[in-house]
Each structure stands twice: as structure tokens, then as C-alpha cells.
Amino acid sequence: MNFETKGLLAQIEEHFRQFVAPKAQDIDTNPAALDEALAGLCQEGWICLRRPASYGGPDVDDATFRGFQELVARYSGALAFLQTQHQSAVTMLAKSENVDLKDRLMPYVGTRDGLIGIGFSQLRRPGPPLVRAMPVEGGYRFSGHLPWATGYGFYPHLMIAGVRPDDKSVFAIVPFTNTAGIHYSEPMRLCAMESAQTVTGELNDYWVSEEDVIHVHEPGWIMKNDLINITLQGYFALGCARGGLDNVWAAFERKKAEFIREAWVALDQELTDCRQAMIDAQQTSGDLTTQEKLDLRAWAIDLSARCAHAGVVATSGGANALSHPAQRVYREALVFSVTAQTSAIMESTLRRLVRRA
């Protein structure tokens, strides 16, 4: 990690400490508070970290981006969950061959009017496609069910995907608001990060112009992409683990019990080891088998849950209050345990938990 990367991450962490951490409980439950935190990322230019330099940047390197993921998850799971939707959309848009669409959208992805959610996780589900894209003159007609789209009320645009008759997937931009041919549900009730306003969507013969098509991918693209990104989503789990350890340390400072400090030291060392192993995996990914990458992801998930649980235990009965950060982080660990989950990640996580038992 170079000096410039360290400097930027230090600046970002200071912002989170000052403007996010004191409001993290409110951000978790109050969309207005989350909206304010999101506006802060836009104002600082951190909501589109992978935007190419040709469109205004900042196009940060992988180390900086993964460091950012870990930091935002440490201070607010809800903000991490919300902002990653747009960061992923920007990354995908940057790789599009639709130059006119990029020229139209990329200049604005750092502003509130240019924010984009994503709604294509259904491509991972086996069986008949939940959303179909039928080719018609000048574009496609999308029909089907979107089971998961986060950011309703925050993002004006949504990136969706439908499957063509030839099994290729069409990715396109549609409005993230109710309109003719698209209907979104009320926000779901969730145990954590509910303020990010996750909804379902129904597409009824909704026409999308070729001008709004981002990609047409070969069958099975998302599975191949998931194999590339096995460890990348694990940085959210690492950030959640650090949030749990923050609660352990806070409990030690209140109670001065040496066994709490000893627990913190042991878990802190394991977190350091896990992070370094994931960094090494990113740098030498060609030398690792898929199973080794899956084991690293399972380790990060397991560690986030144990550190969050340690925060609850060290806090004692006070952690049972909805207003306590130890409970919030514990609930966030649940979400990061299943974020971007594949069957292989599920299997590796369960095997690790069984081996530990």
C-alpha cells in the first residue's frame, strides 16, 4: 500500500469517525440519517471510487477500494450495504461497450441524480429465469420478478438483468421508481440495515431502448464473475469484525477486566492474520485454488460473527437493547454472512462452522 493510498484512507476514516460513527445507530434505522451519510460520500467524491479517470475519476486502485470497503463496514453496516450497490454499478458501467451510455451517465455518477442501484442477484438462482428480456425492434421488453433491490428512495436509477431466449443476460438501466410497466414493493422489514430500503420489483412488458443497454453477457456470466470475486466481498466481513472488536475494547475500558483485554488481543491478531491472507490472495490469486479462496471467505465470515458476538458478551445485558452498538454490529454480521452468497460460499462457511464445533 503506497503513501497516497494510506493518506486517502486516513482521510476517509477521519470522516467516518467524525460524521458516521456518532450517528451509526440512527443510520441503521432512519432512512433520513442514512441519506445524510450518503450525501457525505457524494460530497467528498467517494461514492464512485472506481469511475475511470477519463470521466473524472478517482479510479482508485484495488488496495484502496478494499480498504474503503472495510472502513465503511466498520463504522456503519447500513451505509456499507447501500453505497456498495452504486459502487458495483459504476464498475460495471465503466466496462460497458455502450460508449454513448457511458458518456451520458458517467459524468453524473458522483452526484445524487446519477446514483444507480443494482437488481440482478436473481441470476444466481437455479431454475427458469425470474426476469426475461425479449428482443424487440429498438430494444427489449422485460418481464418478471426482481426479488431484491436495495436503495429505493435513494437511487433514481436501477441496473437490472433479464435473460434472452438464447440464455444470454441483458443488463440495462431502468427507473428506480414506480412507473408504467414497473412496480416496486414497500421496503422490506429486515433485522439489520432496514434503512437502506430494500424492495422487490415487478416488470410487466417494460420496454428498454438499446441506448440503455449496458452489457449482453454469455450464459453463466454471473457464476464466472462470482468465482473471480470470492474474496472481495469478504472485506465487508473484516470491517464488521473490527466493529465488533471496537465494542469489546469499549467494554474493557469500562470494566477494566483483564480477560476482556486478552480476548480483544487474540481476536485482533486473528483479524490481522485473516486480512493479510486476503491481501496476499488478491496479489497472488493465480496461485490459489478456488477452494482456498472459499476457505478465506469463510474465515472472514466466521471471524465477523465471533468478533461481533464477543462485543455482545463483553457488553453484558446492555447489548440486548436495540439502541446498543454491540447488537447492531451483531445483526450486521448476519447480513455480511450472506452478502453475495453462492452455494460454494455457503458450503465452505458451514464446513468451517462444523469443523470448529
Image: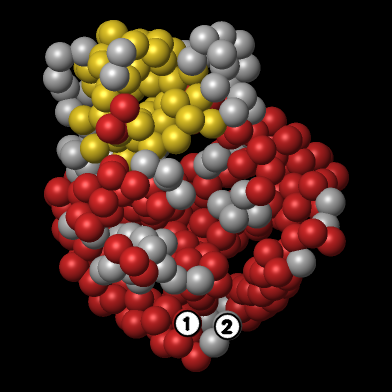
State the residue at coordinates (34%, 11%).
136
Labels 2 & 1 near each other (Cβ < 8 A): yes
Image coordinates of residue 160 in percent, x first then y, are 37, 29
* Image disc number at residue 48: none
State the residue at coordinates (69%, 31%).
343
Image coordinates of residue 171 in percent, x first then y, are 41, 31
State the residue at coordinates (50%, 25%).
169
User: Quick one: 86 or 341, which is closer to the camera?
Assistant: 86
User: Quick one: 208 or 67, which is closer to the camera?
Assistant: 208
Q: Residue furthest bottom?
A: 3
Q: Amino acid at mark 2?
A: Met
Residue tagged by mark 2? 1
Q: Report the Cα–Cα distance between label 2 and label 1.
A: 6 Å
* Image disc number at residue 5: 1
Kindly state the secondary structure of the residue where label 2 is placed. Answer: loop
Image coordinates of residue 43 in percent, x first then y, are 18, 68
Estimate how packed mark 1 is, as few (under 14), some (14 to 19) or many (20 or more) residues with alpha carbons within 10 Å. some
Image coordinates of residue 152 in percent, x first then y, are 23, 35
Kindly state the secondary structure of the residue where label 1 is placed. Answer: helix
Estimate how packed mark 2 is, as few (under 14), some (14 to 19) or many (20 or more) residues with alpha carbons within 10 Å. few
Quadrant of the rendering where the N terminus is positioned: bottom right
Quadrant of the rendering where the C terminus is positioned: top right
Q: Amino acid at mark 1?
A: Thr
Residue 136 seen in this snapshot: yes
Please state if 286 lies on the left or on the right of 50 as rendered: right
Q: Is residue 264 above or below residue 289?
A: below
